[in-house]
Image (cartoon, helix red, strand yellow):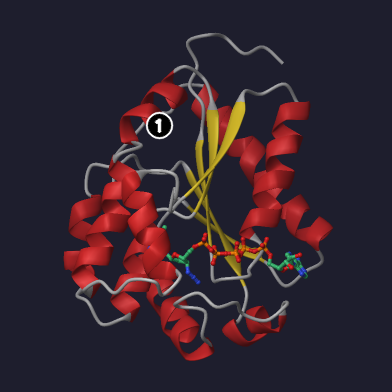
Amino acid sequence: NNHSSDSRGALIVLEGLDRCGKTTQSSRLLSYLEELGHTVESWRFPDRTTNVGQMISSYLANKSHLDDHTIHLLFSANRWEKRSLMESKLKSGTTLIIDRYSYSGVSFSSAKGLDVEWCKAPEIGLLAPDLVLYLEISPENAAERGGYGEERYEQLEFQKKVAQSYKTLRDASWKIIDATLPIEDVEKQVRDTVLNCVETCREGKPLSELWL
Ligand code: Z5A
């Protein structure tokens, strides 16, 4: 592998319903790319370690109540506080694998009934992913995996609405992955797509901003 120092990393996002396997696939993808000699980091949103992230975490755990618009803007702010670090990492050649991003932000809030365009507005200007891996699974199927926990949003009826909202956000950067297959088979679909994307970014595909 010939990684020249001026080539950039790829911004890869994993999206999908609760329990679709994002965490599982993120960590497998991280190891795989590391073994191939790439510089790579795995991130997740919400990033619960920041002050904003702690407010989000308390909301998700049902320990605090926030107006729907307010929590939407906090999720967005949580991405904005990582934007400059994200850009410098990518430009210095680090590939980022990100578990949830703006698509979660818009899908979950619009599933509550907020206007989609209003939901997208605060995301404008964040970095656009080079690849969105959507791990597709039916809400019923996802619910069977170890059951839902205690967090807000982990309810079948709500997850059905989220699945519908996600559908309206699909664009050219999306790759739909069948997440109902065994873990190794999902991983194989992910690997092929990702290698292709990493190569395109290395060859000089420019970074862009949401929404495309
Ligand atoms: N949210 C929002 O509203 N707005 C925003 O802007 C953002 C998020 C960023 C917290 O997210 C909530 O915040 C989330 C969206 C909202 N609410 N919901 N729902 P989070 O990231 O903290 O939590 P999560 O993404 O929902 O969760 P998760 O539980 O970590 O799920 P996962 O990562 O997709 O799945 P997993 O942990 O890899 O796998 C789940 C189980 O299935 C586990 O037992 C695995 O061993 C098993 N598994 C995995 N793959 C397979 C296959 N292929 N076959 C069979 N079993 C499998």
Does residue 116 appear left or right of residue 165 in this picture? left
Out of 200 and 67, give the one closest to the viewer: 67
Q: Residue 86's x, y, as percent?
A: 40, 31
Residue type, label 1: Met
Q: Which residue matches tag 1?
A: 86
Q: Which residue is farthest top?
A: 5
Q: Residue 139's x, y, as percent?
A: 58, 83
Query: In this view of the protein, can residue 180 be seen by the observer?
Result: yes
Does residue 38 appear left or right of residue 124 in this picture? right
Ligand 1 sits in quadrant: bottom right
Position of 206 relative to 55 (above/below):
above
State whether label 1 is within 8 Å of ligand 1. no
Out of 92 and 55, give the one closest to the viewer: 55
Position of 188 relative to 82 (above/below):
below
Question: Dividing the picture into quarters, in which one does residue 70 lie?
Answer: bottom left
Position of 173 relative to 109 (above/below):
above
Give the residue drawn at x 30%, y 81%: 112
Q: Quadrant of the N terminus?
A: top right
Give the residue drawn at x 42%, y 69%: 60
Q: Which residue is farthest front?
A: 63
Q: So how many labels did they put on this image?
A: 1
Give the residue drawn at x 51%, y 85%: 155
Does residue 148 appear left or right of residue 96 in this picture? right
Q: Secondary structure at mark 1?
A: helix
Query: In this view of the protein, can residue 206 be seen by the observer?
Result: no
